Image (cartoon, grey):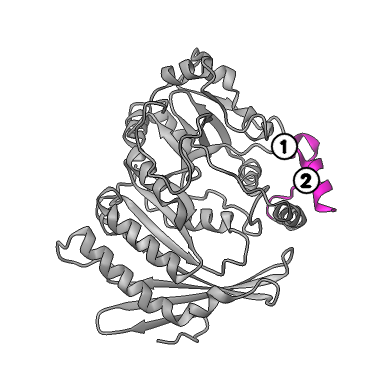
Amino acid sequence: PVYNVPGISVISDKQNKVVLSKKLSYSSCRRFSLNTTTLSISNFCLQDESSNYVNLERQFDLIQQYISPFNYLFNEKYERSMLFSTVVIPNVLACYQEKHIHPSDITLTTHMSYDKFYRLAALSMRWNGPMSVSVRITSMEDLNKLRSDISNHHNTLQNVAFHIYFETGHLPYPHNILRNLALDYVKSDYFAMFDIDFLPSPINTHQDLRLMFDKHPELKKKMNNKTVFILPAWELKSKEFSYGTNIPFQHPIYPEIKEKLMEMKLEGQIEMFRHKLYKPGHTSTDYEKWSSNTTCISYPVKAKEFGYEPYTIGATTGVPRFFDDFRGYGLDKLTFIIELFYAQYDMEVLMDFFVFHLYHNTTKKRRHLQKNQSCVKCFVEHLKKEYNAGHLGKQNEVTGWDRLMKMSKL
């Protein structure tokens, strides 16, 4: 099939109906447009009692069929084009989740490129609850590798809904677009949000969180009234794991409970995430207070300095989104916390839950940071338009407003 239809169209074959919607967006700071086509395939899940594997193979056959008219997008060059095509196919392998999701569930949202699959497999087993995962694909080869990996692990991924985002590999990685995509397809009333290189503790995190919120309904009430809960982020110093390795969901070096983590901290095996490279990112969580374990089940915090970017749990309805223009390295996550502030959200840290980071080599591309700094102006304009930011008086502005303004004038 060839899809050259503006707006929203419906294309039918003998068995399936494809709802095709198009959206054209322009990034003024990056000076290019994205023509995004979303292909929502009905009858994606077989109505009989077919196995997850049968559904998976059928779905990927359909994906390869419907993506074929868009193969050209993989070859679009950043230097030569000001208009790029992207394709989104949501809710891949979501059959089991659609039947078993409960409103009180907490859906973990994350994003990845296909080469981080083994981290996803470990994450899904530790979380052991519903997940919404955006995957960036930049070639048919990537898609085939993803299909193979999912096929080999389909029994451990039945709670995962994948949303496949196709675009050229010549564009910087779209962190915030993928975060929003995963968030947009959450089917439960609550979400959790952290990156693919983190694992949660204690193990079976979703069940323990559900039990805690059921035991303490006041916490759920807070979430429904604009409070997000923060999971402190830690970093293992061990470099035992890297890309391409089979990441285990359990291992002797993992801090399975808070007491074990505190022992590892004393022995120098674990530390606050990135505190030497980017201290503002998590300092406001107040690790000293969390470590003391002398408060209630949670405690309130505020961003003490510009750059706070913790990992959060909250209510799905009405939550702000990430600012799409930020791609590649730098400034992407902090836009969410800034919007939470202006949307009048509160933040509290959970005392007995945390995430820990598995080592991987980082690729900090300074040109991405420079471009993202040029996009701050657009972000500031968005804050002014949506929240009257910059006109509220110093005491009511987000921490670091002056720094944002300086960056917006670069």
Q: Judge the density around disc 1: few (<14), some (14-19), many (≥20) Cα neighbours within 10 Å.
A: some
| First-in-chain label (2 vs 1) | 1
Q: Position of residue 56 (x, y in %)?
A: 27, 63
- Looking at the rendered structure, the kind of residue marked 1 is Phe
Is label 2 in a helix, a strand or a loop? helix
Q: Which image quarter holds the N terminus?
A: bottom left
Q: Position of residue 390 (x, y in %)?
A: 79, 46
Q: Is residue 222 above or below residue 404?
A: above
Give the distance between the C-alpha atoms of the residues marked 2 and 1, in whole angstroms: 9 Å
- Looking at the rendered structure, the kind of residue marked 2 is Leu
User: Which residue corresponds to the image point at 34% horizontal and 31% vertical from the top-left?
Assistant: 208
From which residue to which does the magenta span run? 386-410
Q: Is residue 123 left or right of residue 373?
A: left
User: Which residue corresponds to the image point at 24% horizontal and 64% vertical from the top-left?
Assistant: 55
User: Which residue corresponds to the image point at 68% horizontal and 52% vertical from the top-left?
Assistant: 365
User: Which residue position is annotated with label 2?
Assistant: 404
User: Which residue position is annotated with label 1?
Assistant: 306
> Is 400 a magenta residue?
yes
Q: Position of residue 233 (x, y in %)?
A: 53, 32
Q: Residue furthest left?
A: 49
Is label 1 in a helix, a strand or a loop? loop
